[in-house]
Image: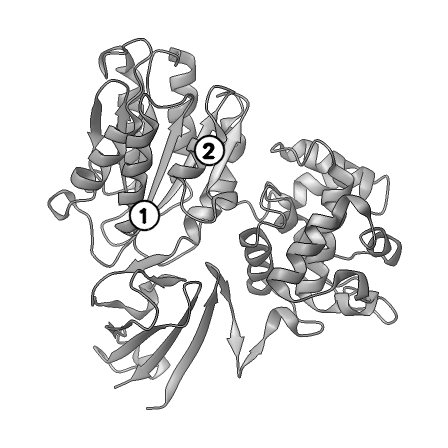
C-alpha cells in the first residue's frame, strides 16, 4: 500500500497538508479545520496569544468558518474573517503594531505593510488581519475573557453598531468542549494554601468540573486526576479511579465538601514544586493508570508564589522532560509572571494564564478546554495505538535527527474497506525542534 497520509506539524500547531498544498494559504479555502489551524498557528506564534478565544469565535460569527454563501462574493476579499478594506488598511503602517509586524516577518516571512487586501482571500492572511485589527482596537487593555464583553467589542469595532447578542449567541454554538479521539491523561494540581477561602475553593473545583465536562471520561479516552497542596501535597484521586463523567464529577464534589480536612493550611506555606513532583512520580505512574501512548497534560492552579521558586522551576523542568504538557493558571496579583512562565510549557504565551480572581476563573473554561484538546503527544518510546485514536499532534523529545516508529492498528471497518487488525507503521522524523513529519505507511 502507498503512503496514506502525510501530515506536517509546525510549532505545536496542526496544519493540514494535502498534495503539498497548505490550505491556510489557499485562496477561498474554508471550514472548521482550516480556521482551527490558522487560529492555532497565530496563537502559537505569540502574535495574538491572549485573544481569549475571540479570533476563533469571530470566524464563525462573521462567516460560519467560510461556509456562509456570501463569504467569497465577487469583488470582496475579506476572507473567512470578513475584514473590510478600511479595517485592513488600519492594520498597516501603524506605530502601535510595529512589534507585531516584526513577529509576522520572523514567523511567517510576510511583510505586512506590503500585503494587499486581495491577499485576505487566503485564510492565514485574513486571520492575521483580524488579529491585528483586534489588537489595535483593544489597546491598551486587551481582550476580555467574558463572552458578553467580547460581543460588545465586536459590535463596536467590526462593521459597527450590531447588537452584542448576535455575537454571543453564535459564538456559543462552537463553545462545546473538546472533540477528539486521542487518549488523554489529565491532572489538575490545585493550590489550597491559607490564602484560599472556602468560597474560592468552591469556585476552583467548579471550574475543574466544567473543564472536564467537555471531555469523554473513560479508560479508553480521557482520564483525570486531582492533587491539592499547601505545605504538603495530597492526591485526591488518581487518574484511573473514575471511569465516567458522573463518577468524576461526584469525586470532585466530594473534595469540595471536605475542604477543611484536605490539607493543613499553614500560613505562608505553598510548596508548588513538591506538588508537581508528586504529580509526575505518583499520579503519572503506570500503577495508577497512566498510559504510555496517552497525551499527558497537567494544569497547575495557584494564587501566589511558591515558597521555593528554584524547586518549582526544577520540578517543572522534570515535567516538561517527561513529556507532560503543562499549563499554569495564576489567580490574583500575588504571583509573578516569571514563575507562571517557568511552570508552563513552551511557548508560555499559550500555556500560562492569569485572571484577577477566582470569581473570574470560570471564563477560562473554554480556553483551557481547547488548549488541552490540541496538546501534543511527546513520544519517548515505540508505542501502539488505534489509528482513529491517534492524537492530532506528535512531538519528539529526542535530539534533531531522531527517528522513531510506532505501529498503528486500524479498526476493522469492513464497510470502509479496512481489514480488521491491519497494522500501519508511523515514522516520526525530526527536522528541527519545532517541525515533525508524520508518515503513515500501510502494511
Left or right: 117 as drawn, with respect to 219: right
Q: Residue at x 74, y 37 (%)?
A: 138
Q: Tell me the quarter of the image containing the C terminus.
A: bottom left
* Camera-side residue of 114 and 395: 114
Q: In this view, does 253 lie above or below 412?
A: above
Left or right: 341 as drawn, with respect to 53: left
List x then y, in percent, for residue 33.
55, 63
Q: In this view, does 106 lie above or below 326?
A: below
The answer to whether residue 65 is seen in the rendering is no
Task: Tell me where residue 297 sits by quadrant.
Answer: top left
Residue 320 numbered tag: 1
List x then y, in percent, for residue 386.
27, 68
* Camera-side residue of 338 and 389: 338
* Camera-side residue of 198 and 313: 313
Left or right: 92 as drawn, with respect to 439: right
Q: Residue at x 23, y 16 (%)?
A: 263
Sort mark 1 into few (<14), some (14-19) or many (20+) by Cα contacts within 10 Å.
Answer: some
Sort mark 2 into few (<14), some (14-19) or many (20+) by Cα contacts within 10 Å.
Answer: some
Amino acid at each position: 500500500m502507498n503512503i496514506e497520509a502525510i501530515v506536517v506539524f509546525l510549532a505545536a500547531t496542526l496544519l493540514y497538508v494535502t498534495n503539498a498544498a497548505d490550505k491556510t494559504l489557499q485562496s477561498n479555502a474554508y471550514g472548521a479545520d482550516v480556521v482551527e489551524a490558522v487560529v492555532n498557528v497565530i496563537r502559537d506564534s505569540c502574535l495574538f496569544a491572549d485573544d481569549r478565544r475571540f479570533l476563533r469565535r469571530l470566524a464563525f460569527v462573521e462567516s460560519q468558518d467560510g461556509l456562509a454563501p456570501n463569504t467569497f462574493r465577487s469583488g470582496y476579499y475579506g476572507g473567512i474573517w470578513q475584514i473590510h478594506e478600511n479595517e485592513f488598511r488600519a492594520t498597516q503602517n501603524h506605530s502601535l503594531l510595529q512589534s507585531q509586524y516584526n513577529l509576522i516577518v520572523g514567523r511567517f516571512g510576510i511583510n505586512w505593510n506590503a500585503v494587499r487586501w486581495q491577499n485576505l482571500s487566503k485564510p492565514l492572511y485574513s486571520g492575521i488581519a483580524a488579529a491585528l485589527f483586534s489588537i489595535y482596537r483593544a489597546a491598551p487593555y486587551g481582550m476580555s475573557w467574558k463572552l458578553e464583553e467580547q460581543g460588545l467589542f465586536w459590535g463596536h469595532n467590526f462593521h459597527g453598531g450590531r447588537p452584542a447578542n448576535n455575537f454571543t449567541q453564535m459564538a456559543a454554538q462552537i463553545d462545546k468542549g473538546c472533540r477528539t479521539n486521542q487518549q488523554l491523561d489529565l491532572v489538575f494540581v490545585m493550590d489550597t494554601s491559607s490564602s484560599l477561602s472556602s468560597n474560592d475553593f468552591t469556585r476552583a473545583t467548579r471550574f475543574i468540573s466544567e473543564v472536564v465536562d467537555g471531555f469523554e471520561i473513560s479508560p479508553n479516552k480521557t482520564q483525570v486526576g486531582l492533587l491539592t497542596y499547601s505545605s504538603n501535597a495530597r492526591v485526591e484521586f488518581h487518574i484511573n479511579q473514575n471511569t465516567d463523567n458522573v463518577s468524576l464529577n461526584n469525586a470532585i464534589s466530594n473534595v469540595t465538601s471536605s475542604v477543611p480536612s484536605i490539607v493543613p493550611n499553614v500560613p505562608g506555606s505553598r510548596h508548588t514544586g513538591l506538588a508537581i513532583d508528586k504529580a509526575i512520580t505518583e499520579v503519572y505512574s503506570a500503577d495508577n493508570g497512566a498510559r504510555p501512548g496517552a497525551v499527558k497534560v497537567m494544569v497547575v492552579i495557584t494564587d501566589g508564589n511558591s515558597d521555593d521558586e528554584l524547586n518549582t522551576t526544577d520540578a517543572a523542568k522534570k515535567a516538561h522532560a517527561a513529556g507532560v504538557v503543562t499549563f499554569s493558571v495564576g489567580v490574583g496579583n500575588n504571583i509573578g509572571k516569571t514563575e507562571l512562565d517557568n511552570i508552563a510549557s513552551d511557548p508560555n504565551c499559550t500555556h500560562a494564564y492569569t485572571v484577577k480572581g477566582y470569581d473570574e476563573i470560570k471564563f477560562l473554561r473554554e480556553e483551557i478546554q481547547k488548549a488541552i484538546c490540541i496538546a501534543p503527544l511527546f513520544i519517548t518510546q515505540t508505542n501502539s495505538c488505534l489509528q482513529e485514536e491517534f492524537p492530532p499532534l506528535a512531538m519528539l523529545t529526542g535530539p534533531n535527527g531522531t527517528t522513531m516508529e510506532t505501529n498503528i492498528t486500524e479498526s476493522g471497518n469492513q464497510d470502509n474497506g479496512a481489514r480488521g487488525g491491519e497494522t500501519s507503521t508511523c515514522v516520526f522524523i525530526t527536522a528541527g525542534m519545532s517541525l515533525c513529519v508524520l508518515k503513515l505507511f500501510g502494511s
